[in-house]
Amino acid sequence: MLKWITLAPLIGALINGLFGKRLGEKVVGAIACLSVAVSAVLAFASFNQLTHASAGADGVRRVTDYFFTWISVGAFRADFAYLLDPLSGIYILFITGVGLLIHIYATGYMHGDPGYYRFFTYLNLFMFMMLTLVLADNLLLLFVGWEGVGLCSYLLIGYYIRKKEAGDAAKKAFIVNRIGDFGYMIAMFLVFTTFGTISFVDKPGAGGEIVRSFLVTAAAMPVEGLWVFGTMTAIALLLFVGATGKSAQIPLFVWLPDAMAGPTPVSALIHAATMVTAGVYLTARCSWVVTKSPTAMLVIAVIGAATAIFAATIGLAQNDIKKVLAYSTVSQLGYMFLACGVGAFTAGIFHVMTHAFFKALLFLGSGSVIHGMHEEQDIRKMGGLRKYMPITFATMFVGWLAISGFPLLSGFFSKDEILWRTFSTEALPPGVGNALWGLAALTALLTAIYMTRMMWLTFFGQERFGQARPGHSNDAHAEHTDADHAHAALGKPHESPAVMWIPLAILAVLSLIGGLVGVPAAMGGSNHFEHFLQPVIAEAQPFGHTTPVAHSVTRGEVGTPTIDGREAAASESHVAKSEEHHDTSTELGLTVLSVILGLLGIGIGIAVFSKKPLRKMPKTLEEKYYVDEIYEDAVIQPIEHLSRDGLWKVVDVKIIDGFVNGVARMFGDISGVLRYTQSGFARSYAAVILLGAIIVIGYFSYIALR
Amino acid sequence: MVPLSWYLALSAVLFTIGVVGVIIQRNIISLFMCIELMLNAVNLTLVAFSRFLGDVTGQLFVFIVMTVAAAEAAVGLAIIISLFRSRETINVDEADLLRL
């Protein structure tokens, strides 16, 4: 059944891609939405099946679906097979669920666009690739999805093919991601050479024996010391390099803000809810390896926290509504990696899910605003929109509170969980957790401030859109010359159609209640989410302990399936859990503090921006710390210089061309001499034959007579 | 009885005339006839040896040579005719398309 979850969108993409041009908007939209709907229904059914499945020997519930063996060379084996376990289960639920809502929304948003069928082809293809990514049962198939979503991201960022800016942004995204993919590939090679398999599940080997998943083998390995660059550290860090590319972390985050050149539903689906969280998925999936390296954990946590606060400060000063949300996404992704780095992988995944709800909501809401404002994206030219777009306002209001950490909304629970786990982490050197908590808490404050600024400038205060606007300079729909833009001249914002606001409303409800699946024990909840994920996620080692919690499995004794690294790890972690209960007061104290920070942020935002909404923001922030300019000077220019003056003009022209031309000239010269023999006179040829005959006969005569 | 060496000498003379003719002649017909002369010089040698060694294989071989020579003559003459039709000449030196 799993394969149909992914195949349904692929079939949709094929139909729309091949025949979409002749089918007309309604049919194309229906096919696209229907295929994702089928996928969503199957995903929920599979998830249900998963929750009723009996746990395997290692305590993990799994549903697998084997397609075919893709590559089998020697010991190397890569299957085209899907694996549904709690981790991928949660991912497919929100991918198909949020994906379906965004598809429905897009049928309204893209109405009248000449590339309608192309858009939905790419979008369906993206769904196929994303689901393949999370359902893959080995690193190579995961990489197929990984590259596939990268391709779709490229195609959709550059969707407005007539806009140079969109094409440039698409290329930037693709190239920056390629740097990350390099790390991923090396990590994959290392995993194979170290463990002899790249599979996430145990597989029968060539000789009938069971080849253990590399995650299980890794679970039993000793923890490497801090700043010891062993194999585990190398794999973990290289995987993280891949993750920084896909999930837009420092230093590879630069593509994500530019990716906003794509249509808004794309920003919501790919660049907020799903694709960019693939890096978090990868880190959580390989948590058994990552937790073996305190170095990698530290790097991940520090980069995550740094990205969070860095992007949040930039988000404060952006004027494009989508850019604010883009930096916000980068910042929230930083939170997720911070969670992974401190060993709270479940909290990271929890935040992935709640973030998918509220950020998709905010992006779709911003799309609705842009639509209603006739393609205006500059929040300085909005204001007072809540009168004109009450539904969009109401839904975005929920998103705003959710991301700001307003109590009992989805973002509150997940963010608070991350903050608490950062503060109390034992996986990092003493003090580091507290310092990172400080950064994360400050980021929470900044998040509330910049979201308040965005909301205030958009929906409250004075109306600023009546003033003369210098043309459609910010026009995201360059190809969008539909009739409904005829009244753009009137300048009156309007509410979006039902097909757009219904998904918004559903997402708003999800943002309201989505956090309740993971209410922490300290607040009287039972944290279903964490317990559900627990078996597939490794427990981080307390810092300084180098012996693995799991001691029973070595690669030699794979024949004993009942004792397993994961089981041992899980049981020990439960012991650790019960010991943790005493300090709930600290946890509750921190929760209160983060609520205060969130409300304070909203308060500061309102206080500062209600009086002077167009307040000048610091230039450094507005210019995004000049990161693009620094990269231009430090990376792009030297490479271009080296390529042009070194590789092209010296290596290529002088050496390679010189060699090729030299060989050609040599043969030319030899031929120039030889061509004198080709006189074209038949009689001279005859003479040469005669001469040859005489030489041959003479030679043999000489031998005979000697 | 005429000794073998006489036959061989005659044949060598004929062959040499043929070779020289091929090299110095420009008329393609003469050139062609010189080739026939060389073939027949060889034939003469074969027949002479066959007679003196008492082995008929040599004579059979001559028949094969004559058959092939006939076929060659047919093809060769056809080429000469088409050459003449296209170039209005039977001078081999003027058929020099391969020259640079």
Image: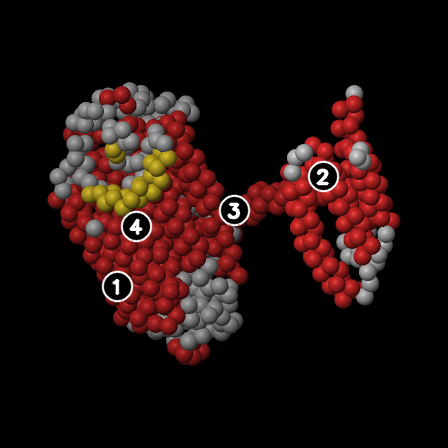
Crowding around mark 2 (Cα neighbors within 10 Å: few <14, some 14 to 19, many 20+) is many
Q: Residue A43: give x, y in percent of width and height.
A: 22, 52
The residue under the point 20% across, 54% down is: A42
Please determine whether, in this image, residue A483 is positioned above or below residue A360. below
Q: Quadrant of residue A525?
A: top left
For disc 4, the marked residue is A131
Q: Which mark is residue A472?
A: none
Foreground tag (1 vs 2): 2
Label 1 in the same subunit as label 4: yes
Q: Residue A150: give x, y in percent of width and height.
A: 41, 50
Chain of the residue under label 2: B
Extreme-front residue of the structure: B1
Q: Is residue A610 left or right of residue A634?
A: left
Please determine whether, in this image, residue A353 is positioned above or below residue A429. below
| Whole-number angstrom distance, CA of label 1 to CA of label 2 | 93 Å
Chain of the residue under label 3: A
Tag 2 secondary structure: helix
For disc 1, the marked residue is A34
Sequence order check, earlier mark of 1 and 4: 1
Q: Amino acid at mark 3?
A: Val
Could one spot residue A8 in this view of the protein?
yes
Label 4 in the same subunit as label 3: yes
The residue under the point 44% across, 57% down is: A155
For disc 3, the marked residue is A627
Foreground tag (4 vs 2): 2
| Whole-number angstrom distance, CA of label 2 to CA of label 3 | 96 Å
For disc 2, the marked residue is B46
Q: Amino acid at mark 4?
A: Leu
Quadrant holding the C terminus of chain A: top right
Sequence order check, earlier mark of 1 and 3: 1
